[in-house]
Amino acid sequence: MKRGIWVFVMVLVWGGIAMAQQRNLRISVSPVLVETGFLKHLLPRFTLKTQVRIDLVETGADVVLGPTGATPILQGEDVVYYVSVPVEGPKAARFVDWLKSAIGQRTIGAFKRDGVQVFTGAADLVVVATKVVFAGDIAVGETLSFANCGRCHVVGPKNRMGGVGSTPSFALMRTFPDWQRRFETFFSLRPHPSFTQITDVTEPFAANLPPTIVPLEITVDQLDSIVAFVATIEPADLGAPIVHQ
């Protein structure tokens, strides 16, 4: 009886190992990178070369491609993308090695959109880590954000049921590569000019075009504090679309 149980357990163990070896390589990719259409160019070429099939997943990935990590692999549109391997395995190693190879780097550079090259390989890029220091007061920025921006945006958990449905949350906007520029110049981006005043920066409202809602009036220092606070917000985890192959 004991021998039968032991054999049954071993069958389960070895069966699980075999299934793990047979499953497709799981990759999680930055949503911004997915939207470029780059993966439709890259992944089929890797599969054709290696016969390794790939599934895009939101969680539990073997390999992650995104704007953070230790190993730069491609760059374009003012962003460097990195590759990391949360779950090591022969398929993950093969994919990373291919990306870093001359063939993989040429494949990255061959992707074009409207006839224009979008990315270049970055396997040889030496990245010097720099920390951006924001001058504003984070606590003041938090208070200002909820009091002013919270009228339309979900700023954080404190007003997660608030905001206007058509406006993006702060966490979502933190996923944008140019989030800092967007916040620093928000007053010039529609619809903000119609109701926003930045002291000594924006022009007064036209006498015949008064704001239709209570004006948002802040100083440059207060705007710096808002940006400093937003920098502390964790970007939303948007995952990546799941592809069934």
Image (cartoon, rainbow, N blue to C red):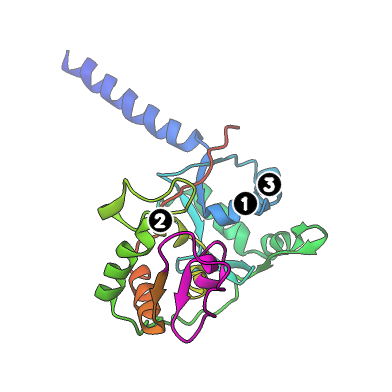
**In the image, residue 220 above or below residue 98:** below
- The mark lying in front, picked from 1 and 2, is 2
Q: Which residues are magenta?
A: 187-215
Disc 2 element? loop
**In the image, residue 202 above or below residue 89:** below
Q: Quadrant of the C terminus?
A: top right
Which residue carries the number 3 mark?
Answer: 40
Disc 3 to disc 2, C-alpha distance: 34 Å
The answer to whether residue 177 shows anywhere in this view is: no
Which residue carries the number 1 mark?
Answer: 35
Could you tell me which residue is drawn at 69 percent across and 61 percent down? 108
Q: Is residue 70 left or right of residue 134?
A: right
Q: Do the residues under discs 3 and 2 have CB atoms within 8 angstroms?
A: no
Disc 1 to disc 2, C-alpha distance: 24 Å
Q: What is the crowding at mark 2: few (fewer than 14 residues within 10 Å), some, or many (at least 20)? A: many
Q: Main structural element of the magenta stretch: helix, strand or loop?
A: loop
Question: In the orientation shown, which residue stands out farthest toward the front?
Answer: 208
Could you tell me which residue is drawn at 44 percent across and 83 percent down? 199
Specify whether residue 195 is painted magenta: yes
Residue 206: give x, y in percent of width and height.
57, 73
The numbered dot on residue 91 is none
